[in-house]
Amino acid sequence: MDEFKVCNLDYFPENILIDVLSYLSVRELVRAGRVCKRWKRLVKDQRLWRTVDLTAWKGVTSRILWVLLRQYLGCGLRCLHLRGLLLSARGGTFLSESWLKALSTKCPRLSKLCLLHADLRSLPTCQILPRSLRVLELRGCELPRSFFSQSPAPATRDRAEATSSVGAPQQGGGQKGKGLACPSGICVERLVLNNVPSFTDQHLQNLASWERLSRLELRDTFRVTANGLRSCAAKEGLSGLEGLSRLKYLEIGITGRHGYQLQMASLGLGAGWLGLEELSLGGKEVGPGLLCASRLKDLKCLHLWACTLSELQIVRSCRMLRGLRQLEFLDVVFQPRQSPPAEEGQGQEGGEEQQNGEEGTGGEGNEENKALEGADPFPSLRRSLAVLLPSCSLVFTNCSVQINVD
């Protein structure tokens, strides 16, 4: 029994040690690599660097990013979260063009990049981002005017034309199977913009050249107007589909800044949007968005969140959405249903009919109906939508009914 009293980590298999190290943060991992040579080798295992979150590390600088990239980050990296210095007192350049190029070279499998409070005005364009990206999230960032533009510089364009003209005879047979490649170099499929005040209609128009963009989420983008959204909507043109023709999911929501000038960007949906199958409206964009949702012929899913709605408003908006398959309410406050006052004669006749109906059905049916209505806070809304949209499924998440004191 004496030989089992001492427990040493050297006897643990490496797979178990890697599982234990996976619960540490990035800063703790770097410190653990200084314990011994074996731990230094284990810390550099790429299974520990698939998802890297540096938003909680407040002291991250460009020097630390270079150290992490040279010593730890590699082909195993899939998701990267970074916090910039936009709200920091130090300031300075955080993401440089050379670091992003080195990131794309050393981490060829990086598919998701999330930037928080990053000042990107020193970057010329988003084309310097890794080409392997499929998801790009920008939260509280500052953007230059031409960040989403894909027009290359004249020198780069001439160099690319010369290279393609020289290598055209040699690569003619191999280019047949490369139809899925992006000639522009941007293969982002999902773009999330949350509280990005510098995002304007010009940036939105530049996104029309992104060939693989199928999901766009705009939250608290206050400078996007209805005209900008209308100009980017997918529509038939002289040369085929124009605008964001590959977009399948669109989210528009304004939840902050009480008293800002309301742009009502969702009114731009009134012109229609070909191919748009899923729409998400939140906050102050729900009201105008519901008025224009009937113009979306291909709409199948509608999500409404963080707003106050009435049953009459929902029923009127859903009358024209016959092709809707799913209607979801998230954090929605429903106003109570207001029934019109009945006249004296109609009230007496209605009371007699109600009494006769109660006598015919019996007390058991009434008890069952009361139990169902007590368990379901939206019975009348469900019945109305079941008549209008019989093939649509309803989802209520964290919803409530407003109670009037009167």
Image: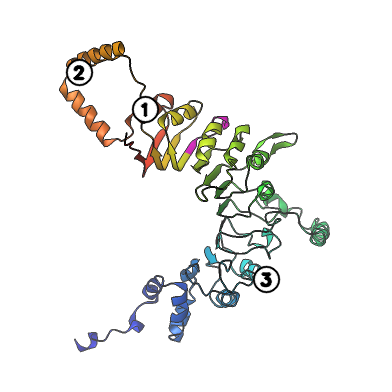
Under mark 1, the amino acid is Gln
Q: CA distance from mark 3 to mark 2?
A: 79 Å
Determine whether 226 is above or below 119 in the image: above
The percent position of residue 267, horizontal first and vertical second, equals 59, 36
Q: Which mark is residue 338?
A: 1
Say which mark, if any, is on residue 98.
Answer: 3
Q: Is residue 91 above or below residue 150?
A: below
The three-letter code of the residue at mark 3 reads Ser
Does any portion of residue 275 appear in the rendered image? no
Measured Cα–Cα span from mark 3 to mark 1: 63 Å
Who is closer to the viewer here, 254 or 109? 254
- Of tags 3 and 1, the one toward the viewer is 1
Quadrant for the C terminus in the image = top left
- State the mark number for residue 358: 2
Packing grade of label 2 (10 A; few <14, some 14-19, many >=20) is some
Q: Is residue 299 magenta?
A: yes
Where does the magenta region start and end?
294-302
Tell whether 282 sits left or right of 295: left
Q: Is residue 42 shown above or below 122?
A: below
At label 2, the amino acid type is: Glu
Q: Quadrant of residue 360?
A: top left
